[in-house]
Image: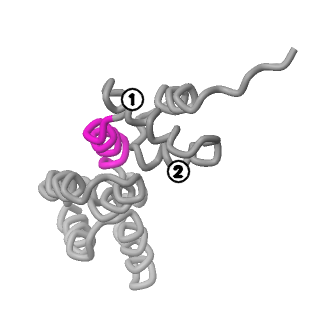
Amino acid sequence: MAFAAPSLKGRALRLLSQREHSRAELERKLSRHEVEPGSLSRALDELAAKDFISEARVVQSVLNQRASRVGAARVKQELAHKGIAPEAIAEAVASLRDTELPRALEVWRRRFGTLPVDAAERTRQARFLLARGFSADVVAKTLKSSADND
């Protein structure tokens, strides 16, 4: 007994049931399954009209899942990769600016917890925080703050 392949809308709903996806992500993931030109766009339009696809929910989801562990630059990169509008990205990144230093301190504490003993260790700790998307200014303050707290 052969089963029919799921429709584009069915595939999109399955992806959306797992986590929030932007329209651009869904287009990227489902384009190879599109048989008739324009059918994917119509299916996504229908899902967006029913509010199954929401850019605001994608942004909120990324902020909730990632902001405690990464800096604003990394969040900005992830949102851009998901195809979120530049205005929404700018708004999300602006909302993170006030909490950047406390979040960097918490990430540093969880990972290291002890001050660097030499320049090589300081460089390693700074590189770790920079790779997480924290700005150089915040990284410098984090390593200085951690030194002041001990």
Relative to 70, 15 lies left or right = right
Residue corresponding to mark 1 = 46
Q: Residue furthest right?
A: 1
The residue lying at 30 percent from left, 41 percent from top is 55
Q: Nearer the viewer, residue 77 or 103?
A: 77
Q: Which residues are magenta?
A: 54-68
Magenta includes 11?
Answer: no
Say few, some or many: other residues with alpha carbon within 10 Å of mark 2 (under 14 / 14 to 19 / 20 or more): few
Q: Nearer the viewer, residue 126 or 90?
A: 90
Q: Nearer the viewer, residue 116 or 51?
A: 51
Which x, y percent locates residue 135?
Answer: 26, 71
Magenta includes 65?
Answer: yes
Q: CA distance from mark 1 to mark 2?
A: 17 Å
Relative to 128, 73 lies left or right = left
Relative to 5, 94 lies left or right = left
Residue 28: which numbered mark, if any? Answer: 2
Up-down relation of residue 79 to residue 62 (above or below): below
Relative to 132, 94 lies left or right = left
Q: Amino acid at mark 1?
A: Glu
Which x, y percent locates residue 41?
Answer: 45, 41
